[in-house]
Image (tube, grey):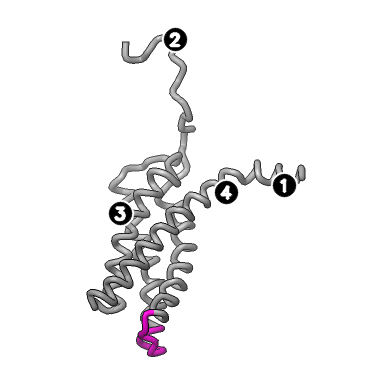
């Protein structure tokens, strides 16, 4: 039991970060899959256009969730820089989804909604691994100074007086 406790203490921040990243990712996945199916089946935009549209919306949600919740304790190197890199890296990750959907649809001839969703899940899985690694490496950088958890002590004097 002591070993498990030490392992948890050692990796607790990583476990919490992965849980938050996974939560945001799960919601973004629901948004992505819902819009993919809506655009493809209801709007008849085709699988590739539908995937790009769905990913654009879900990526915006994911950026906001990851910036202001998952990686909020990391250095903020500028909203513009982060947003640009986030979307650039998501564009690369989108290739995983587009390639798997394109392969299933145009190479294997599987153009039914179930095959589209299975291909989407495979592409999202590969893209998620790439995104987590790349966000930590290039977008949400480690803080160079510790970010305070609480407001500094004021010695009983309220700062607004």
The quarter holding residue 12 reads top right
Q: Quadrant of the C terminus?
A: top left
Point out which mark residue 84 bears.
3
Point out the tag, 4 or 3, that comes first from the N-terminus.
4
Point out the tag, 1 or 2, that comes first from the N-terminus.
1
Tell me if label 4 and label 2 are in contact, CB under 8 Å.
no
Residue position marked by numbered label 1 in the rendering: 4
89 left or right of 10?
left
Q: Residue at x 75, y 46 (%)?
A: 3
Point out the tag, 4 or 2, that comes first from the N-terminus.
4
Q: Residue at x 34, y 67 (%)?
A: 34
Q: Nearer the viewer, mark 1 or mark 3?
A: 1
Q: Position of residue 151 (x, y in %)?
A: 44, 23
85 to 51, vertically: above or below: above
The quarter holding residue 156 reads top left
| Residue 137 shows in the view | no
Q: Secondary structure at mark 1?
A: helix
Residue position marked by numbered label 2 in the rendering: 156
Neighbourhood count class around disc 1 (C-alpha, 10 Å): few under 14, some 14–19, many 20 upward? few
131 left or right of 64?
right
Nearer the observer, 144 or 52: 52
Tell me if label 1 and label 2 are in contact, CB under 8 Å.
no
- Which stretch appears magenta? 104-113
Residue position marked by numbered label 4 in the rendering: 15
Q: Residue at x 43, y 77 (%)?
A: 119
Point out the tag, 1 or 4, that comes first from the N-terminus.
1
């Amino acid at each position: 039991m002591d070993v498990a406790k030490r392992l948890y203490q050692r990796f607790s921040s990583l476990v919490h970060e992965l849980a938050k990243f996974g939560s945001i990712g799960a919601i973004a996945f629901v948004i992505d899959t819902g819009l993919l199916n809506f655009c493809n089946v209801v709007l008849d935009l085709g699988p590739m256009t539908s995937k790009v549209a769905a990913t654009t919306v879900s990526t915006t949600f994911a950026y906001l969730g990851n910036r202001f919740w998952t990686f909020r304790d990391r250095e903020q190197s500028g909203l513009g820089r982060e947003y640009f890199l986030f979307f650039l890296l998501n564009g690369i990750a989108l290739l995983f989804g587009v390639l798997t959907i394109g392969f299933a649809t145009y190479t294997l001839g599987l153009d039914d909604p179930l095959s589209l969703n299975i291909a989407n899940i495979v592409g999202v899985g590969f893209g998620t691994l790439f995104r987590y690694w790349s966000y930590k490496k290039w977008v949400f950088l480690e803080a160079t100074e510790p970010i305070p958890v609480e407001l500094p002590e004021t010695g009983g004097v309220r700062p607004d007086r």
